[in-house]
Image (tube, rainbow, N blue to C red):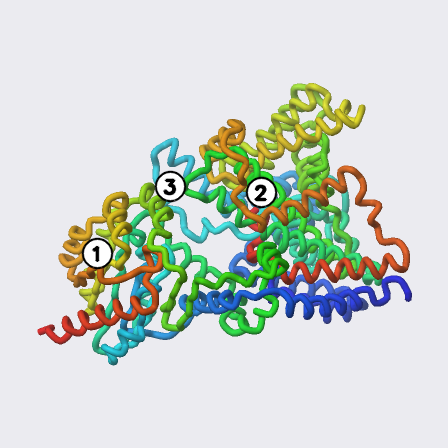
C-alpha cells in the first residue's frame, strides 16, 4: 500500500464502523434531545398566545396549559417559565412579543416564588442562554435532535454503569410539552431533597423588594393595555415555604398587597393542599390539580367582571 | 462560525470542494479565500466585517504609502498604529477605561457608551495585531507591500486563523498565497491528523473540564477547601491549554489542506522547566509578536540589566491587557513578569539542566508559578483571585475534589500525555512501519469515535474573546 494514498479514507471508514458499533452499544439518555428541543422551542417558536405563564421551575413543572385550556377554551396558553426564571424587563419584553395582538382577552399569569424576585435569578440565565444560542444549533435541536440522539455523548460514569451492568437511573421522569409544561414525576419522593439548595440560595439572596416594585410597575403597564395579570405563590412543602418566608424574607401578604394595588389579581393557594416530590416541585397529578384550580379562579374573575 | 459546529463541517466541505479548482488561477483563489473568510467571520456578526475592512484598508494603503512616499513614512506608520490601537481601544477597552475613570472621578461615562461599542468583536486582537505588524514590517523594509488587495485581505482574514490565531507574519504568508503549491498527500494526512487531534483536545478534554472550572469559579459561595481549589485551577490550566492549542491545531491542519504552512503555536508548555522556556512554548506566535514589536523596540536586553527588566515588565503587562480588558489580566501579566524577573536575577534557566533532581524541582516551581498566575486569569475579580489563592495556600479542608469520575478521567488523560512528553517516552510511540501505519489510522479512527461519544457540552473557544 502506497504510504498516505488512502489514509484519510481508510481512517474515516474505520471511524464509521467504530461509531456504528459504539452508537449501538453505548447507553442513551432518551431525555436529552427532548429536553434540548423543548427549551429551544420554548424560546424560539414564533407562535402567539393570549395566556402566558411566567415564573421559575416550580411554575413550568407546576402549571399545565392543557388544564387551563380545558376550562378556558377561548385561550391559547403557553408556559413561558424558566429555571431560576427571574422576572425582569427582558422577560417582560419577550412576553409582550409572544402575546397575540388579536383576541378579546389577554392574560398573564405570574408564579411569584422567592427565586423569581431575588438578585440570584434576576438575569434569567437559562432564557439568555437559549436566546443567544447559535441559529444552526437551534435548528439542529428542534428538527434533528431525535436522529442525532444515536450519537449522543456519554460520560465515564455511564460507561462504568454499563460495564457493571447497571441500567441508567430513570427515577426522574420528565415529559416535555410544546406548550412549555414539563410533566414531572420522581421516585421515590423525598420532600426534604430540595431544602439544602434553597437554604444556600435564600441565605445569600433574599427577596429584593425593588424587583417587586419593578414587577408592579410592569403590571400597571400591562393592565393599562387591557392585559389581565394574575399572580400566585407556587406551592411547596411546608418547611420550604417556611424557609422562603424566613431566610428568603418572602412576605406573601406584602407582595400580594403590592400586586393588587398595581391592578393585578392575587390567587391564594393553600400550600398544604399540594404534595411535592422533592419539597419544591409538583408531580404531574398535583400540577393538573393546581392548574385546574387556577383556571377556575380566573374563570370566576372573568365571569364576575363588570 | 465555530470549528466544532455542524455548520462549519458543511462550510469546510464546500470550501475544499471548490478550493481544488483554484490551483491554476491565483486571482480566483485569492478572491475565493477572501470571500469565504468573510462569510466565515460574518456568520457570527456581519456588522464587524466592516471593522476588518477598515483596519485592513488603512494598513493596505499605509504600507503602499510608506514605499511610495518615503518622506512621509513615519507619519503613515504612526497613523496606521493610531488607527489600529484606536479601533482596539474603542471596541475592546472603552468599557474598561470608562469604568475606571468613573471609579476615579465619580463620573458616569460608562453608562453613556453605546451598547454596540461594548460588544468585543471576535478575534479583534488577533487581526489587528496581524494588520499592524504588516505595516511595521514594510516600514522596517523587511518586504515590499502587496498591491493586490485580495492578496492582502486573504492574508489578513484567512479563516483558519482569523479569530484565534496563530498570528502569522506577512513575510511568511504573502509569498505562500501567490504560490502555485497544492497540498501533497502527506500534507493532507498531516492536516487531517492535526484537525482530529485539535478536535479531541477541544471537544473531549477542554469541554469536559469546562463545567468543573465554571462550577468552581462561578459559584456564589466559594469553597474553603484547598484541595478543591488546587484541582479547579489545574483543571483550568489544562482546559485553556487544550482549548487554545486545540484551536491552533485545527487552524494549522486546515492550512495544510490548503497547501499553506502556519507556524507551531504550542509545544507542550507544561513540560517547561523555566518560565522563559514556558513562553517559548505557549502561544508562540503571540510571544514572538510581543518580542519583535514591543520588547525589542523598547531596547530588549541590549541596554542595562535594570532597563531590560523594565522592558520585560512593560511587555508582559501589555500582553496581559491584550488578553482582556480587566485588572485580573494585567495582574496575570504582572505575575509572569515578576517570576521572569526572579528567574533572570538568580540565573535559573542556565542552572536548571545540571541534574534530573534540579530539573524536576524547577518544573514543580514553574508549574506552581503558572497556576498562581492562572488564578488571576480566570477569576472574575481581583478580590476573588486573592480569596482563591488564600484558600489554596492555607492547606485546609479534606482531600475531596467534588467532581466524581467524569472530570477526573479527562484531566488524567491529558496529564498522562504531558508526563509522557516530559519524560520523553512519547517518542517511542511513533508509528513507523507498515503495521504502524494501520495502527496509526486505527488510532485516529478511535480518536474520532471518542470525539463523537465523549464530547463535552459544546462551548465557544476561550480565546475567541481575545
Q: In the structure shown, which secondary structural element does the residue marked by tag 3 occupy?
A: helix
Q: Nearer the viewer, residue B82 or A153?
A: A153
Real-space CA distance between mark 1 and mark 3, rounded to the nearest whole angstrom: 28 Å
The reply to whether discs 1 and 3 touch (Cβ–Cβ < 8 Å) is no
Q: Earlier in the sequence, mark 2 or mark 3?
A: 3
Above or below: residue A106 compared with residue B334? below
Residue at which label 1 appears: A217
Does residue A149 appear in this view? yes
Q: Residue at x 22, y 72 (%)?
A: A295
Q: Are marks 1 and 2 on the same chain?
A: no
Mark 1 and mark 2: span between their CA atoms? 43 Å
Front position in the image: A279 or B128: A279
Task: Check the residue under mark 2 and report the chain it is in.
Answer: B
Q: Position of residue A306 (x, y in %)?
A: 8, 74
Q: x, y (%) of residue B326?
A: 49, 38
Q: Residues within 10 Å of mark 2 (few under 14, many from 20)?
A: many
Place of residue B369 in the rendered image (x, y in percent of width and height, measured from the top left):
62, 30
Q: Which mark is residue B236?
A: 2
Q: CA distance from mark 2 to mark 3?
A: 34 Å
Element under disc 1: helix
Does the rendering let one see residue A210? no
User: Residue sitting at 81 percent across and 61 percent down?
Assistant: B183
User: Which quarter of the figure is the N terminus of chain B placed in?
Assistant: bottom right
Disc 3: which chain?
A: B
| Apparent side of residue A229 relative to residue B5 in the rendered image (left or right) | left
Residue at x-position 57% and y-position 40%: B322
For label 3, the residue is: B109
In the displayed structure, does residue A292 sit left or right of residue B389? left
- A108, above or below B339, in the image: below
Q: Chain of mark 1?
A: A
Amino acid at each position: 500500500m502506497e504510504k498516505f494514498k488512502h489514509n484519510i479514507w481508510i481512517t474515516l471508514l474505520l471511524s464509521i464502523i467504530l461509531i456504528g458499533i459504539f452508537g449501538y452499544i453505548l447507553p442513551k439518555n432518551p431525555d436529552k434531545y427532548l429536553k434540548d428541543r423543548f427549551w429551544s422551542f420554548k424560546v424560539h417558536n414564533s407562535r402567539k398566545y393570549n395566556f402566558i405563564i411566567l415564573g421559575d421551575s416550580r411554575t413550568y413543572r407546576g402549571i399545565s396549559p392543557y388544564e387551563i385550556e380545558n376550562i378556558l377554551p377561548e385561550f391559547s396558553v403557553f408556559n413561558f417559565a424558566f429555571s431560576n426564571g427571574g422576572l425582569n424587563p427582558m422577560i417582560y419584553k419577550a412576553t409582550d412579543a409572544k402575546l397575540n395582538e388579536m383576541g378579546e382577552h389577554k392574560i398573564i399569569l405570574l408564579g411569584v416564588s422567592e427565586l423569581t424576585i431575588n438578585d440570584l435569578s434576576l438575569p434569567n440565565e437559562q432564557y439568555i442562554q437559549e436566546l443567544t444560542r447559535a441559529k444552526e444549533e437551534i435548528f439542529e435541536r428542534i428538527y434533528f435532535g431525535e436522529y442525532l440522539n444515536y450519537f449522543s455523548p456519554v460520560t465515564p460514569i455511564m460507561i462504568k454503569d454499563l460495564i457493571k451492568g447497571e441500567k441508567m437511573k430513570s427515577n426522574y421522569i420528565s415529559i416535555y410539552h410544546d406548550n412549555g409544561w414539563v410533566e414531572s414525576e420522581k421516585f421515590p419522593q423525598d420532600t426534604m431533597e430540595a431544602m439544602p439548595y434553597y437554604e444556600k440560595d435564600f441565605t445569600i439572596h433574599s427577596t429584593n423588594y425593588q424587583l417587586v416594585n419593578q414587577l408592579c410597575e410592569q403590571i400597571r403597564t400591562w393592565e393599562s393595555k387591557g392585559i389581565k395579570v394574575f399572580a400566585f405563590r407556587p406551592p411547596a412543602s411546608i418547611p420550604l415555604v417556611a424557609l422562603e418566608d424566613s431566610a428568603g424574607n418572602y412576605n406573601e401578604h406584602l407582595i400580594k398587597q403590592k400586586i393588587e394595588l398595581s391592578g393585578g389579581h392575587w390567587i391564594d393557594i393553600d400550600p398544604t393542599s399540594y404534595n411535592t416530590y422533592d419539597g419544591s416541585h409538583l408531580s404531574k397529578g398535583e400540577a393538573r390539580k393546581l392548574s385546574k384550580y387556577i383556571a377556575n379562579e380566573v374563570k370566576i374573575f372573568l365571569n364576575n367582571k363588570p | 462560525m465555530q470549528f466544532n459546529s455542524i455548520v462549519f463541517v458543511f462550510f469546510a466541505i464546500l470550501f475544499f470542494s471548490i478550493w481544488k479548482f483554484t490551483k491554476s488561477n491565483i486571482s480566483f483563489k485569492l478572491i475565493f479565500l477572501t470571500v469565504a473568510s468573510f462569510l466565515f467571520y460574518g456568520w457570527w456578526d456581519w456588522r464587524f466585517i466592516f471593522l476588518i475592512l477598515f483596519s485592513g484598508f488603512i494598513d493596505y494603503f499605509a504600507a503602499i504609502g510608506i514605499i511610495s512616499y518615503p518622506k512621509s513614512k513615519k507619519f503613515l506608520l504612526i497613523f496606521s498604529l493610531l488607527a489600529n490601537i484606536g479601533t482596539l481601544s474603542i471596541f475592546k477597552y472603552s468599557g474598561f477605561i470608562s469604568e475606571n475613570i468613573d471609579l476615579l472621578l465619580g463620573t458616569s461615562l460608562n453608562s453613556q457608551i453605546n451598547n454596540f461599542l461594548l460588544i468585543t468583536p471576535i478575534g479583534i486582537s488577533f487581526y489587528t495585531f496581524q494588520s499592524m505588524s504588516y505595516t511595521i514590517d514594510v516600514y522596517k523594509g523587511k518586504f515590499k507591500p502587496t498591491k493586490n488587495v485580495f492578496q492582502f485581505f486573504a492574508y489578513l482574514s484567512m479563516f483558519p486563523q482569523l479569530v484565534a490565531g496563530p498570528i502569522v507574519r506577512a513575510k511568511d504568508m504573502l509569498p505562500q498565497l501567490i504560490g502555485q503549491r497544492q497540498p501533497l498527500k502527506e500534507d493532507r494526512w498531516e492536516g487531517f491528523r492535526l484537525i482530529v487531534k485539535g478536535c479531541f483536545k477541544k471537544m473531549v478534554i477542554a469541554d469536559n473540564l469546562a463545567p468543573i472550572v465554571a462550577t468552581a469559579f462561578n459559584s456564589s459561595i466559594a469553597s474553603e477547601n484547598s484541595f478543591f481549589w488546587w484541582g479547579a485551577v489545574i483543571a483550568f490550566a489544562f482546559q485553556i491549554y487544550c482549548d487554545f492549542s486545540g484551536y491552533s491545531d485545527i487552524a494549522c491542519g486546515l492550512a495544510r489542506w490548503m497547501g499553506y504552512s502556519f507556524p507551531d503555536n504550542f509545544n507542550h508548555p507544561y513540560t517547561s522547566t523555566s518560565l522563559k522556556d514556558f513562553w517559548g512554548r505557549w502561544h508562540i506566535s503571540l510571544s514572538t509578536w510581543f518580542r519583535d514589536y514591543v520588547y525589542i523596540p523598547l531596547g530588549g536586553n541590549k541596554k542595562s540589566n535594570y532597563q531590560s527588566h523594565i522592558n520585560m515588565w512593560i511587555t508582559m503587562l501589555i500582553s496581559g491587557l491584550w488578553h482582556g480588558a480587566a485588572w485580573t489580566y494585567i495582574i496575570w501579566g504582572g505575575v509572569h513578569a515578576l517570576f521572569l524577573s526572579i528567574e533572570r536575577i538568580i540565573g535559573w534557566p542556565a542552572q536548571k539542566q545540571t541534574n534530573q533532581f534540579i530539573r524536576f524541582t524547577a518544573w514543580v516551581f514553574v508549574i506552581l508559578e503558572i497556576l498562581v498566575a492562572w488564578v488571576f486569569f480566570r477569576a472574575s475579580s481581583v478580590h476573588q483571585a486573592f480569596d482563591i489563592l488564600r484558600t489554596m495556600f492555607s492547606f485546609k479542608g479534606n482531600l475531596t475534589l467534588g467532581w466524581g469520575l467524569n472530570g477526573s478521567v479527562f484531566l488524567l488523560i491529558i496529564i498522562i500525555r504531558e508526563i509522557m512528553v516530559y519524560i520523553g517516552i512519547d517518542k517511542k510511540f511513533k508509528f513507523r512501519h507498515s503495521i504502524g501505519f494501520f495502527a496509526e489510522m486505527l488510532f485516529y479512527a478511535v480518536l474520532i469515535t471518542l470525539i463523537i461519544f465523549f464530547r463535552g457540552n459544546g462551548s465557544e473557544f476561550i480565546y475567541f474573546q481575545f
